[in-house]
Amino acid sequence: MNKRDKEQNWVQFVRVLINSPGAVLTGGVGALVLCQGSLSAPAFAQVPIPVHPIPINLASLKILSILPQNPLVGQTITVNYELDNVGMGTASIGGTVGGSFGGQTLRNADGTPQAPVTVAPRATAKGSLVFTPTAPSSGNLTLGLYGPPACSPGPVGRPCKVPLLTSAHSPLTIVEPTVHVRIAGQTYADVAMKDSRDNSSAQNGYLYISHDPGCGWWGNNATDKFFDNKLLPAGATLEGVDYLEFWPLGIDASYAGGDGLGTGSYGASLSQYPYPSVKWENSCWSVFGGKAVKYAISFRIAMPQGTNLGEPTTDPTATPAPPSVPDGYSRTPGTGTNIAPPLNFYLVNKGTSFQATFGTLNAQGAITDITNGEDESILILSDKNLNSGCNGTGNVQLTAHAAATAAQMATLYGTSTTKYPKTIGACLTRPNDGSKQSLLVVVSYQPQ
């Protein structure tokens, strides 16, 4: 290798050292001085010449850890770092390590500024700085090694500059601490108001909802939805749902499925997927006829501290006040024997008589009484006369709006109560001129 090639290689080596990311060449007497005749003039001109001779010493600063790993507003955050002198020279590296994040200055754990540090060649120094964030923030945390102040001489004088020798960065996000609250959820509720008497109200962290059947011929059914159209604020999540259905006093809840006549179903049920919802139905018939469906619901929310949910919050970790029970209702399903409200039942003109079947194949229950619903006398047909018409023996005559006695029921059906489904037949006691297409009877029955 000739002299010029050697010079070019040496120049390139110095350039690499000077331009190394995260490294600094520090001052002092030492390992390399760039003007002792080893470089020719053209090569020498290509090397940036600092004011002082440059020994080859490299400063490396790195962030070892930031603790805790998921820092919160108000917590003391500790930043651990390492400063290495990895140069090939004999000079020590000196300066002060400082840092900042979100406009806050990092300091020692006791609150004092960081003291200067000196690292010998090929040695390591470790340390830590702390700060306590006062607001949520996200960005880069920066540490730097700062050299002694460099002041320009002169009669006027200028402000001293503190040179940044090397630096290290780490992304960091500070969030508010998570709190747990209870809400009634009225802000997030889509309640299906099917009747003018339906209502909802929030009390002590619970939403009380009442659905009246508004009888009427038929009751109502629908689904109340929560967090469907209006979502929780960013960062807030639903942790759980507390739900309680109230039951009318004195009515056996086992009959809530209906009376087997296609009527009488009653109650509410909670589903939590894909969002909380309560499916409900009420009735104008059977044992629950005219009774409003009532329930209370409450939601447990996890959210960053300070989140505005748009309604009052309570602490779910404390013992919550149990939902108050509406008058005439109970927290637990009722038990006992139920007599359903009498049912208006129309018998259809079949030519020789009026007939219709009370109940369905899946019905379970007993007819306890039959009342004439007409303003004139009628004949109730016994089972054996359903096909023969109105002139057979064993029929029972009921005057206008009269009820059959237990003995009359036994005459008709062999017992004072008869199981349904049951075909009921009747005739007018006068000749039918064809204008009468149905007869009204009122059936009292007991679901089983």
Image: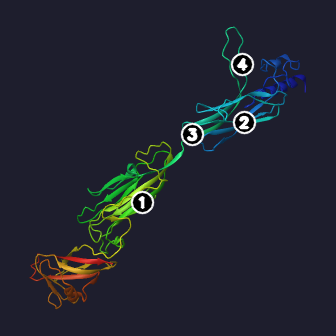
Give the residue displayed 63% in from the left and 38% down from the top.
Answer: 171
Report the Cα–Cα distance between label 2 and label 4: 25 Å
Instruction: Choose the circle earlier in sequence order: 3 or 1.
Output: 3
Give the residue displayed 65% in from the left and 36% down from the top.
Answer: 130
Of circles 3 and 1, the one toward us is 3
Q: Is residue 443 left or right of residue 181?
A: left
The colour scheme is rainbow
Instruction: Choose the circle earlier in sequence order: 4 or 1.
Output: 4
Within the image, what quadrant is residue 64 found in?
A: top right
> Where is residue 349 shown, x and y percent of the image?
17, 78
Report the Cα–Cα distance between label 3 and label 4: 37 Å
Of circles 2 and 4, the one toward us is 2
Q: Which residue is mark 4?
A: 150
> Where is residue 386 shown, x and y percent of the image?
21, 86
Say what amino acid the circle numbered 4 marks. Answer: Ala
Instruction: Choose the circle earlier in sequence order: 2 or 1.
Output: 2
Tell me if mark 3 has few (under 14), some (14-19) or many (20+) residues whose alpha carbon lies within 10 angstroms of its own. Answer: some
Tell me if mark 4 has few (under 14), some (14-19) or many (20+) residues whose alpha carbon lies within 10 angstroms of its own. Answer: few
Say what amino acid the circle numbered 2 marks. Answer: Gly
Instruction: Choose the circle earlier in sequence order: 2 or 3.
Output: 3
Report the Cα–Cα distance between label 2 and label 1: 54 Å
Q: Which residue is mark 2?
A: 127
Can you tell which mark lies on residue 74? 3
> Where is residue 90 shown, x and y percent of the image?
85, 28
Examine the rendered structure and indicate whether residue 261 appears above or below residue 398.
above
Report the Cα–Cα distance between label 4 and label 1: 71 Å
Tell me if mark 2 has few (under 14), some (14-19) or many (20+) residues whose alpha carbon lies within 10 angstroms of its own. Answer: some
Say what amino acid the circle numbered 3 marks. Answer: Gly
Instruction: Choose the circle earlier in sequence order: 2 or 4.
Output: 2
